[in-house]
Image (spheres, rainbow, N blue to C red):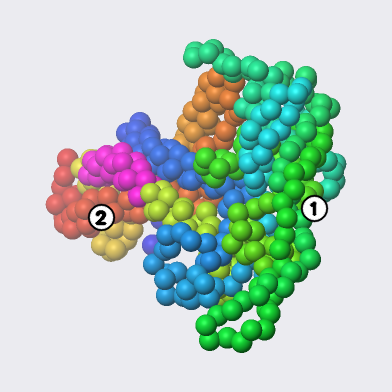
Amino acid sequence: MKLPDLTELALRNLHESMLRNSLTTVGISVGVASLVAMLSLGIGLQQLVSRRLVKSGLFDTVVVTSRRDLRMEREEERRGPTPGESRVLDEPARQEMEHLPNVLEAYPDIRFATELRFDDKPHLTMISGLPSSAKSTDAFEGLQGSFFSSDTAAEAILQKSFAEELLGKTTAPGEAEPNVEDLAKPLLGKELVMRYAQRAAAPATPVPLRPSNASSDNSVVGAAYSVISSEQKLKIVGVADLDPETLRGPTRAKVFMPLKLAESLHVMQPTDLREISRAARNQPVYAALSVRVKNPAQVQMVEDAIKKMGFTTFSILDATRNLRQVFVVLDMFLGIFGSLALAVASIGIVNTLVMAILERRREIGIMKAIGASDIDVKKLFFAEAGAMGVLGGIVGVILGWAIGQVINFGTNAYLKRQSLPPEHFWAVPWWLVASAILFALIVSLVSGLYPAGRAARLDPVQALRYE
């Protein structure tokens, strides 16, 4: 039997029992819709987390620290050089990292606790230097005011909670938090006075050393440096609703200044005490560096290259490996539960085709009497089952997509009432559409195995005698 004839005959047979076949197709559609809806939720949530991490600037960032820091080390670091023999995280090392393939920039992590005076009142807080690239992160989407006008401008951006502290506003339990716009209006353009400890280089001084096994020659043990108290005026140019460095925990900053300005101030850092000789020569030594990579897919490659240089690395990809495993398991379970409805629909296909055999025994007998083989009969029932599967799969995908849109719309309406930004957490990628239709087709063909085999085994003589 030729394919056009087989298709025409299958469609005609489906049309004759319209109600029953339609109900069976609807069952398939509901099964596919539940499968698509559940998997779309899992995929959408995973994409939402990925978007947030990528936009935060953390997903494509590698944090580099020196092994000279006295801290608990991971197992893989213990196989490297000892802390005393490890390389110093200084300016030459930063430049070397910046010239690695696939690296956009490498900038120092400069943060320090200091005193800020506002309206002659002192406020102790943490300050951090931000590169100009931080402007594109999602932390500054709700920024009131403006970003830094230049890399060296004497300007500051305040985090929302610190702005409340400057204005003396406290939020009682159960009371709505002040709006960022209301906090920014009285602060923008005002001046902060920052008092900090500045490191100043001093000339080298010969110091006599007299070890027991050494001569009496004088040796220079290193240049000295002095620490002086300095002030820097900062103009408030913005108030941020979100903390750009939330993942840093208790050490996160509440006030931000341009990174170039922070570097030029030579603020006393803990690393200056450890690397005293380099600090005395006014050569910067960093506690940590942030290395931005062109693409998150290249983070591991850059991490490996930096580790070969003798430094310790950490990226958000290290922390999200378990998270990706959680999403894989979640998608698997959502797919299993979504497939249960499709399994129920497959029983409907079996029932429909078995009933069709009983109703069309005479037709089957005539087909076999005029030369149709058992294979032709099987193909006919497979074609009918496949047609119901494909049609049910297409309708199910559309229905699943519609369900997702309705839930997404309703959830965003609720978020809007709660003064929260809208989110798109429902995703139906093209491969899910194709997989759902293909899965529906396969389930339908498998369900048609028994009816097709039973129809092919009919004795044409007995079928023609059937009333």
Residue on which disc 1 sits: 264
Whether residue 251 is visible, yes or no, is yes
> Looking at the picture, which amino acid does disc 2 mark?
Leu
Comparing 400 with 460, the one in front is 400
Vertical comparison of 333 with 158: above or below: below
Q: Write down the quadrant of residue 377 in the picture.
A: bottom left
- Considering the whole magenta stretch, tell me its main secondary structure: helix
How far across and how far down the image is residue 232, in percent? 80, 40
At x 64% / y 84%, what residue is drawn? 216
| Marks 2, 1: nearer the viewer | 1
Q: Range of the magenta residues?
A: 329-354
> Looking at the picture, which amino acid does disc 1 mark?
Ser
Comparing 261 with 207, the one in front is 207
Q: Please, what secondary structure does the residue beneath circle 1 have? A: helix
Whether residue 387 is visible, yes or no, is no
Q: Is residue 332 magenta?
A: yes
Residue 67 lies left or right of residue 192; in this view the side is left
First in sequence: mark 2 or mark 1? 1
Residue on which disc 2 sits: 449
Bin the neighbour count of mark 2 within 10 Å (Cα to Cα): few under 14, some 14-19, many 20 and up: some
